[in-house]
Amino acid sequence: MAIFKFFVAVILLPVVYASAVSFKLHLAHYPSAYDDIFSCGLGAFLLIYIFVYQFDAVNEFGQKISQGLFKVFSPFDRLISYLFPFYPIVICALFFVNKNFLKIEANDDYFLFFIGFSIAMHILLTAQNLQVEERTAIKPHYLLNIALIFIFNAALLVLLLDTINLKMTFPKYFSLVLENSKEIYLSLIGYASR
């Protein structure tokens, strides 16, 4: 089973890469500042995480709330809490209310910054937790789970941003991921057949 998980994880790596690249390119479908502000949030988290504070307690608090909400799906509540990150979803919900009901657009930058910050925290600390749990050298369970979590979280973020902006760009994102993944697979096959 470990070999199968490792094999599937390796096969999914191009999709992970395509999801990240496609998400970055897809931010152009939203208002112009989204890309820059979101990226600033990602970068700010990494800098603070590396030099100041690790956010373990903050992330653990969010994970516990998320697991509690999905307790009915036990024993999968922990996996579901990884797939549906607490802080980014809460920030997106507040952003939706702020933009569509309160009609305050001056706060958009703050929401985007914290969406980027919180999703970076979720992905990085989830990866750290999953790595610690698996004691084997190759870590097939970790590789498969983090690949699936990353792909799902990128898609979820596009759906949340679509909801906030009252747009439906997810099919374009999905198509872009498929196209980029296909190009990578074809390149690898072409390289291997030389």
Image: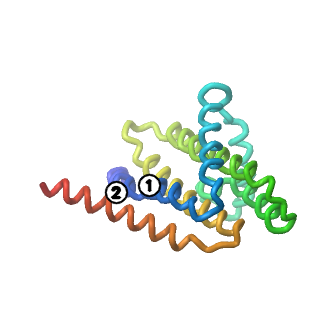
x, y (%) of residue 93?
76, 61
* Residue extending farthest right: 102
Looking at the rendering, which quadrant does residue 77 occupy?
Answer: bottom right
Looking at the rendering, which quadrant does residue 192 occupy?
Answer: bottom left
- Count of marks overlaid on the render: 2
Element marked by disc 1: helix
Q: Residue at x 61, y 48 (%)?
A: 36
**Residue beneath disc 1:** 16
Relative placement, left or right, of 134 versus 8 is right
Residue 78 in the image: above or below residue 170: above
Numbered disc in front, either 1 or 2: 1
Q: Residue at x 59, y 28 (%)?
A: 50
- Amino acid type of disc 1? Val
Tell me, for residue 177, which label it has, or none.
none
Q: Indicate the quadrant containing the N terminus: top left, top right, bottom left or bottom right.
A: bottom left
173 or 105: which is nearer to us? 105
- Amino acid type of disc 2? Ile
x, y (%) of residue 137?
38, 36
Tell me, for residue 11, which label it has, or none.
2
